[in-house]
Image (cartoon, rainbow, N blue to C red):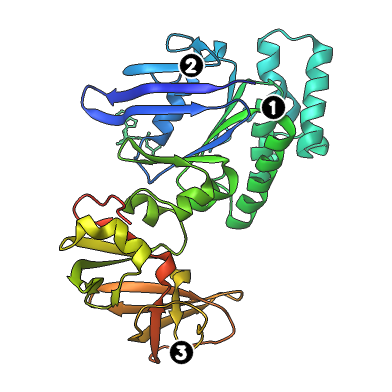
Amino acid sequence: MASVQMKKVSKIYDGKVTAIKDADIFIEDRDFVVLVGPSGCGKSTLLRMVAGLEEISSGEIYIDDKLVNEVAPKDRDIAMVFQNYALYPHMTVFDNMAFGLKLRKFPKEEIRERVSEAARILDIEKLLDRKPKALSGGQRQRVALGRAIVRKPKVFLFDEPLSNLDAKLRVQMRIEINRLHHKLQTTMIYVTHDQVEAMTMGDRIVVLKDGLIQQVDSPLKLYNDPVNRFVAGFIGSPSMNFIEGELVRNGNLQFKSKIFNFDIPEEISKKLRESTGKEVILGVRPEHLYDVSLATDKELSTPQKIQVDVVEPIGNEIFVYFSEGSQSYCMRMSPDKLHEAGEKIGIGIDLKKVFFFDAATEERIG
Ligand code: ADP
């Protein structure tokens, strides 16, 4: 078990592509940390630098208190699980799992014990004699996990390990990896581009964009307290709605836009005072927009008439889409009432749940 620390870690490929810039992350012993961000944001590069598969351009990486910048991957006491499983096709499941231990000259009996134990944890005991081609995608991924477990590494690294699985299996394996983390109590770093996967697996999540860390927080803190528009829009599905407008003083502080206009409640307006006259972006999550006729108990903004474009009845909830100009918005509704496309309804925003971002910097201001 170990902590992992990255201090001002940067990676520049070929002297020109900055993949990661000044990453500072401290991962405590036994933590499950997820690196998440859109494709190309640098998350794999960061993970590969921890693994030792990629040279560090500048900065320092420590595993426990040991500086590992110059330590070979095999001597870092880590195990990595990849998206493509990377199993040896000509070897049985047993031999695939045992391979790393054989290389390290473990005694035969200990290899057998460790492989049996991992196979039991992963429920693949019956598959030990099969070759990878006779396994399903989920079973192959379990073998890849098993191969990492038998090493009893200080740190597990996962690089999009579930991307090749279908949606249902992904959910199942996600739960299994969570369970594995509880059982093994080992430090884990997990890379994914899927924010739902990140939210459901990480104790803490590192959100990356263009090689820069945007925010490091628990899943719910990211959801409820995003530091900027990028994090606010990236976390949550369907995404937060963004409405461009401005803050004007007309007695009270008001938000004015093409679609919503309302007085800003006192508690928030204190924070926004300095931004009076500025262009801002209002952020509202789909669940904080209401049909005013159905939400009489909420403190809502002045009702706005909209016309429903599309209705998606998921079952336990319903997504209603409407638009203003080229901008589309989404509201999440309870399944008690099914609206229809073309219907006109009055909607309001829960004023206790709004976010404001500076239109120029996109930083959160309220
Ligand atoms: P992610 O895992 O978030 O999709 P990567 O870490 O793979 O992102 O890549 C980050 C950036 O670095 C991208 O712009 C990518 O094109 C670039 N990159 C990755 N690997 C290399 C490489 N071997 N040589 C040059 N550029 C690379």
Residue 36 placement: quadrant = top left
Which mark, by number, is residue 340? 3
What's the residue type where badge 2 is placed?
A: Tyr
Quadrant for the C terminus, please.
bottom left
Which badge, 1 or 3, is on the more N-terminal residue?
Answer: 1
Image spot of residue 215 (x, y percent): 40, 41
Residue at mark 1 to residue at mark 3: CA–CA distance: 52 Å
Label 3 residue SS: loop
Left or right of 94 in this view: 358:
left
Residue labelled with disc 1: 149
Considering every residue shown, the one lying at the far left of the view is: 277
* Camera-nearest residue between 149 and 100: 149
- Residue carrying label 2: 62
Locate ligand 1 by image quadrant. top left
Mark positioned earlier in the residue sequence (1 or 2): 2
Mark 1: secondary structure? helix
Residue 39 sits in quarter: top left
Give me the C-alpha separation between circle 1 and circle 2. 22 Å
Front position in the image: 94 or 257: 257
Q: Would you say residue 74 is visible in this rendering?
A: yes
Q: Quadrant of residue 64?
A: top right
Near-viewer residue (138 or 336): 336
Classify 10 Å Cα crowding around label 1: few (below 14), some (14-19), many (20 and above).
many
- With respect to residue 92, does 170 lie above or below? below
Q: Mark 1 against mark 2, which lies toward the viewer?
A: 2
Q: Is residue 17 left or right of residue 336?
A: left
Q: Is mark 2 within 8 Å of ligand 1?
A: no
Distance Cα–Cα, label 2 vs label 3: 57 Å
Give the x, y percent position of residue 214: 36, 41
Can residue 129 be seen by looking at this rendering? no
Contact between labelled residues 3 and 1, with CB atoms less than 8 Å apart? no
Q: Is residue 50 above or below residue 323?
A: above
